Amino acid sequence: MSDSSEQHSDKKNDKHYRYLVFIGRFQPFHRGHKAVIDEALKRSDEVIMLIGSANLPRSLRNPFSVAERAAMIKGAYSAEEAARIHCVGLDDALYNDTRWLQYVQAGVKSVTGDLQADIGLIGHSKDSSSYYLSLFPNWASVSVPNYHNLSATPIRDSYLMGATPTPDRTPESTRKVLNDFKKTAEYQQLHEEADFIDKYKRQWESAPYPPTFMTADALIVQSGHILLVERRSMPGRGLWALPGGFINPKETLFDACIRELREETRLKVPEPVLRGSCHSQHTFDDPYRSARGRTITQAFYFQLKNDPKGLPKVKGGDDAAQAFWLPLAELDAKMMFEDHYAIITKMVGL
């Protein structure tokens, strides 16, 4: 970086803003996050916390609700300071940056009332915030050094396995929320799932490198309804999912999709009709889409013709507690397993 650009950056970092926006998941809120807010409170009149992964079911990666994370954040400050901090839930939009940008803009506008206001984006240097900067060219950026290289992931993983976060890593407000949550049945379910995933991953400890898994999923739509299953086992027991699963060593992705669909739903459609109804396919490879490890899925979208006799009969089998047709209007992100809601919205165009 040239001397002139460094001087320009310093001047930009000296500026006082009307609003500074901090985007994160805060799962959970730790002292590294607090250091960013401390700086934002010095550098702006008001701080907008966009709390990501809102409106999702509790999972090992997203165990805490927006309300719980807001309590962690605001509880770390005096009443006067907390009044300057606005906590806004931010939905994920995996595989759709344009939609996510719309969500961010809407979240900021809900506080500022005007996207042309004096707005800046604040975050750690050399992390995902550097990617955000290219997405928000109209907003200035304020970079804050990473505080003791703290990360929420090991704090969260240890907590879900039963440990209590230490005061040097988390403020008292976070520990209070975590201690209260630990007494709930929801925590117990996540604790059991964390233990399951830990044992699952130990099967691969002797591998020379972490494995990458490949799955196939079936997205079946007929007459404004989508075919879903309820998961019988961990992870995600009780959540809704697309029929699908891991491919066998000697089958194609498409054959794996058809096999898993048959096993989990007993869908009463002749196989030639089913194969001929495949409309499109897409690869979904978000690195964090599965708690089990790096898992890439190929989703196949089938459009079945309307039938005056009604929807084909289905019955849950194999890994599915039940199979059912759901009106598309009743899809609920809070009920969906992993990234299946994002897969559906991407492929169906909702």
Image (tube, rainbow, N blue to C red):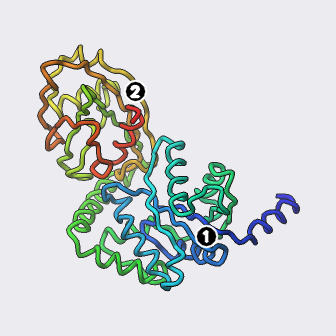
Residue 15's disc number? none
Q: Is residue 175 left or right of residue 105?
A: left
Q: Residue at x 35, y 43 (%)?
A: 341
Residue density around tag 2, few if under 14, some if 14–19, many if 20 or more, within 10 Å: some
Q: Is residue 171 above or below residue 192?
A: below
Coordinates of residue 259 in the picture (x, y in percent): 23, 27
Spatial CA span between label 2 and label 1: 40 Å
Q: Residue at x 33, y 33 (%)?
A: 216
**Amino acid at pointer 2:** Gln
Q: Is residue 173 left or right of residue 314?
A: right
Coordinates of residue 308 in the picture (x, y in percent): 15, 18
Residue density around tag 1, few if under 14, some if 14–19, many if 20 or more, within 10 Å: some
Residue, disc 2: 281
Please tell me which of labels 2 and 1 falls first in the chain. Answer: 1
Front residue of 275/341: it is 341
- The quarter in which the N terminus is drawn is bottom right
Residue, disc 1: 146
